[in-house]
Amino acid sequence: MKRKFVGIIFLATTVLAYSPLNSDVVHAQRKSVNKVVLSKEKKKQEQVIYSGDKVINKYLISYNQKNPDDVITPDMFDVYYHHGRKHDNQIKFFNKGGFEIVITNTIGNIEIVIDKSQGEQSLKTVDEFKAEFKKFAKASKKSVTDDELEQIWNDAFANYGHYSSKTLEVSLTSYDSKVERIMISGKTS
């Protein structure tokens, strides 16, 4: 009986003696896995186009991924200055098509205003506005096809310039059957 008792104590002591080693190995493995996860997260976070606002930056990253032929770079835009001060939650720029673009973070949602340039005397064509709409709207939705964007555009036209869904809202301002301004708002993808 004493032998069994001594054997059990020896076995328990041996197991307990090696437990810290196993625990250190497990801890080291967890640290290694955490480093890999953190390095992947850092890579995602390292892509900064606009450091003034996380929501706008996320939208710009999405826009650039979905429009590789027409990327927006930090040197293209400025913080929007109006009402006597700069607004970090808004950026403004003129794109290649000559449109004035204002992108705003409205409390976690994104709002894009596509307007004809102030200096332009003639209005842009409906097709030019539609092309800009498609580029900026597809960046605000996770997955959307060109056919769906075409349908949204047509629905907005048919509904006196308005389209609304759970994730996207579109407003067209027009005069004499010519589009003057588009406003797109929704959550960022």
Image: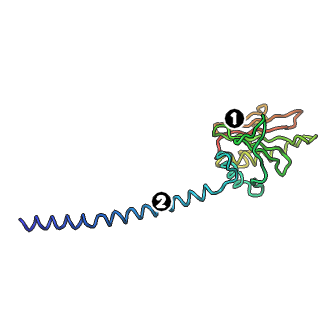
In the rendered image, which residue does mark 2 sit on?
34
Instruction: Give the residue at x 34% y 62%.
Output: 23
Decide if residue 47 is on the left or right side of residue 123.
left
**As displayed, is residue 155 above or below residue 1?**
above
- For residue 164, the mark is 1
Q: Amino acid at mark 1?
A: Ser
- Look at the image and tell me whether residue 152 can be seen: no
Instruction: Give the residue at x 41% y 64%.
Output: 28
Number of disc labels: 2
Q: Farthest residue toward the top?
A: 160
- Look at the image and tell me whether residue 42 can be seen: yes
Q: Amino acid at mark 2?
A: Asn
Provide residue 77's location: percent of width, then percent of height: 78, 49
Closer to the observer: label 2 or label 1? 2
Q: Are marks 2 and 1 in contact (CB under 8 Å)?
A: no
Provide residue 97's location: percent of width, then percent of height: 85, 49
State the separation of the CA atoms marked 2 and 1.
Answer: 42 Å
Instruction: Give the residue at x 67% y 54%.
Output: 48
Q: Quadrant of residue 45?
A: bottom right
Decide if residue 58 is on the left or right side of residue 101.
left
Specify few, some or many for label 1: CA neighbours under 10 Å numbering under 14, 14-19, or 20 or more: some
In this rendered view, identify the residue nearer to me: 90 or 143.
Answer: 90
In this rendered view, identify the residue nearer to me: 139 or 152.
Answer: 139
Q: Quadrant of residue 66?
A: bottom right
Decide if residue 54 is on the left or right side of residue 182.
left
